[in-house]
């Protein structure tokens, strides 16, 4: 498989050579990169100790992407205007590719290991940049093919063999455009943000992009009416001819498909010229400073930045110590609290995975309250007369569960030896301290924000529901931590998969929110029943946290089996 992809991209050797790349060096670098990709373990379904190569992962990923590709097929299948349907298809497809590049391939595009391995060698900037671009291109080809295959087959079935034969060309050009946009943006960030600041800016941009993509996926369909979408015409959107994805769709004018917007024939030429011009500009003019900027990522910051960073760290440590003393009695628990508080801020991977969950809650909520195709304003007006605030309150558990999931994972998991080198009798105290840190730092702020919104919409009559939901949600995540997260903070390799027993326990635990939420809903109009329910929940929460606190080394070992 490696030889197939390698030979495929090396067919363009005359072009790559004209751009200044050394062909032999380019082939050698790409071969090593592809070999390393094949040796990476899967994130799910493979234990850390397994060394055996996974042979069926490519087939499995192809099937999963193929299923996802059916989603991109619907504009072609149901929108009557062919050029408009293709413009919609390429727009969604390019957005998905760009999102994947931003979120998943930054480590490929900006692999700082190059400065230790390749920079001392006589490898020019054009070769390095092309190796990264072609590496990502090959990786994307494995994704683009199954994504585009359903639309490809549908287009051939509806429009004939000419349309099917033309289809791969605009798809390939679309990939070039996505590569240029992402790389150009990354290079722009490198110009503005130096060293460690680049990683921070990139991390927050990835978070914002993930939220926007997620929100658009769920909320944009709410804006359109299904029947209107079937009869929509491209003449209603004359501005589309200034969008590159429309230029790709205009390529179908070559095979006789009618185009209603004037000048589309010339725009179809841009569909070919623009991607190759972007690729040429990126390699020829932007690459000279590329390698130097990559080398600066791990460079030393200026004295001013170091002082500022030191001041920030001292403030965070002081705040963490004060809160640790408030919420914990034992020194072990205080240590776990401080460690989880500080490390969750320092870990970019943790932030990237947890921060988007803050935005997912309102997006989910807006998606749910508009399921009957009602307008947003009308849906908000009806909220006051409903009890949907309970749904919003219990959805806040998503933040806490997301943070708990990644609390135990770390790329530097070997540093957890310190836990086993100290005379800690009950590791449960450290885990409970970390649990409280996540509860205070991530869950409590979002719950307070949701509570302010609920009070503003439904009034102070629901204060008792806010208190009961707070206890119930805490009880829920405490049960999940007690059963499924018996690990010390940031002590587990990220590729470690959960055993079948723990997965089964997690599924059983998920019945808890349904039970708690149903009980709360039944007591929503009976204050006395809420107080009884609250007393029972508080007692059960105390028992669960006490059991979690008393977790011994032997119980942790049993949980790993």
Image (tube, rainbow, N blue to C red):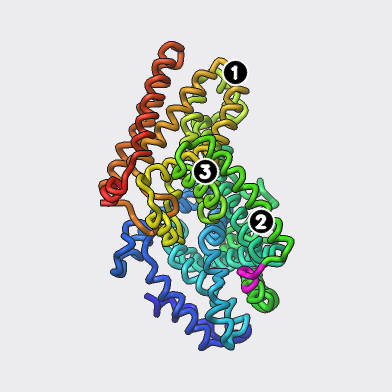
* Residue 225 shown left or right of residue 415 in the figure: right
Q: Which residues are magenta?
A: 295-300
Distance (Cα) linking label 3 and label 2: 29 Å
Residue 206 sits in which quadrant?
bottom right
Image quarter (top left, top right, bottom left or bottom right) of the N terminus? bottom left
Residue 160 sits in which quadrant?
bottom left
**Counting residues from the N terminus, which is met first, the one under dot 2 or under dot 1?**
2
Q: Residue at x 59, y 76 (%)?
A: 129
- Residue 90 appears in the rendering: no
Distance (Cα) linking label 1 and label 3: 26 Å
Name the residue tied to disc 1. Answer: 459
Label 2, residues with CA under 10 Å away: few <14, some 14-19, many ≥20: few
Q: Residue at x 69, y 51 (%)?
A: 238
Q: Residue furthest right?
A: 304
Residue 366 percent coordinates (x, y): 55, 34
Whether residue 446 is situated above or below residue 83 in the rendered picture: above
Residue 70 percent coordinates (x, y): 42, 52
Q: In terms of depth relative to the viewer, which is nearer, 480 or 418?
A: 418
Whether residue 49 is situated above or below residue 120 in the rendered picture: above
Name the residue tied to disc 2. Answer: 310
The local secondary structure at tag 3 comes to helix
Whether residue 492 is situated above or below residue 266 in the rendered picture: above
- Residue 357 image label: 3
**Counting residues from the N terminus, which is met first, the one under dot 3 or under dot 2?**
2
Residue 102 percent coordinates (x, y): 56, 59
Q: Residue furthest front?
A: 423
Which label sits in the foreground, 3 or 2? 2
């Amino acid at each position: 498989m490696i030889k197939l992809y390698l030979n495929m991209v090396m067919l363009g050797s005359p072009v790559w050579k004209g751009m200044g790349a050394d062909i032999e060096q380019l082939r050698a670098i790409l071969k090593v990169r592809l070999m390393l990709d094949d040796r990476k373990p899967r994130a799910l379904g493979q234990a850390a100790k397994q060394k055996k190569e996974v042979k069926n992962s490519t087939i499995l990923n192809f099937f999963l992407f193929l299923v996802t590709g059916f989603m991109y097929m619907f504009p072609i299948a149901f929108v009557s205007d062919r050029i408009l349907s293709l413009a919609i298809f390429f727009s969604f497809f390019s957005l998905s590719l760009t999102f994947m590049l931003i979120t998943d391939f930054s480590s490929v595009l900006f692999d700082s290991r190059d400065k230790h391995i390749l920079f001392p060698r006589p490898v020019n900037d054009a070769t390095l940049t092309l190796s990264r671009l072609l590496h990502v291109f090959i990786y994307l080809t494995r994704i683009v093919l199954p994504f585009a295959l359903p639309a490809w087959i549908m287009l051939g079935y509806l429009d004939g063999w000419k349309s099917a034969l033309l289809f791969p060309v605009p798809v390939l050009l679309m990939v070039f455009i996505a590569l240029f946009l992402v790389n150009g943006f990354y290079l722009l960030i490198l110009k503005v943000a130096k060293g460690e600041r680049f990683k921070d800016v990139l991390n927050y941009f990835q978070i914002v992009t993930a939220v926007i993509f997620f929100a658009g996926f769920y909320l944009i369909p709410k804006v359109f009416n299904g029947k209107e979408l079937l009869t929509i015409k491209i003449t209603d959107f004359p501005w589309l001819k200034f969008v590159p994805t429309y230029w790709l769709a205009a390529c179908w004018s070559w095979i006789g498909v009618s185009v209603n917007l004037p000048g589309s024939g010339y725009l179809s030429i841009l569909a070919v010229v623009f991607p190759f011009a972007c690729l040429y500009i990126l390699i020829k003019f932007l690459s000279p400073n590329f390698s130097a900027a990559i080398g600066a990522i791990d460079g030393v910051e200026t004295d001013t930045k170091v002082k500022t960073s030191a001041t920030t760290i001292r403030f965070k440590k002081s705040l963490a110590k004060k809160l640790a003393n408030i919420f914990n009695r034992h020194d072990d628990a205080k240590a776990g609290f401080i460690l989880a508080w500080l490390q969750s801020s320092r870990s970019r991977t943790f932030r990237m995975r947890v921060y988007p969950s803050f935005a997912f809650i309102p997006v989910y909520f807006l998606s749910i309250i508009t399921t009957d195709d009602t307008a947003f304003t009308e849906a908000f007006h009806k909220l006051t007369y409903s009890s949907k605030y309970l749904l919003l309150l219990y959805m806040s558990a998503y933040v806490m569960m997301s943070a708990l999931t990644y609390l135990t994972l770390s790329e530097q998991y070997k540093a957890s030896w310190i836990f086993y080198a100290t005379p800690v009798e009950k590791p449960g105290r450290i885990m409970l301290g970390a649990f409280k840190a996540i509860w205070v730092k991530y869950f409590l702020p979002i719950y307070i924000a949701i509570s302010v919104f609920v009070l503003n919409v439904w009034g102070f009559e629901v204060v008792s529901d806010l208190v009961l939901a707070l206890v119930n949600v805490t009880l829920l995540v405490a049960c999940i931590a007690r059963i499924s997260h018996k690990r010390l903070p940031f002590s587990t390799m990220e590729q470690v998969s959960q055993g079948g027993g723990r997965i089964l326990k997690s599924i059983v635990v998920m019945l808890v929110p349904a039970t708690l939420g149903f009980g709360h809903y039944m007591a929503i109009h009976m204050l006395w029943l809420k107080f009884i329910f609250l007393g029972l929940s508080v007692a059960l929460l105390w028992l669960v946290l006490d059991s979690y606190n008393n977790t011994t080394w032997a119980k942790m070992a049993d949980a790993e089996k």
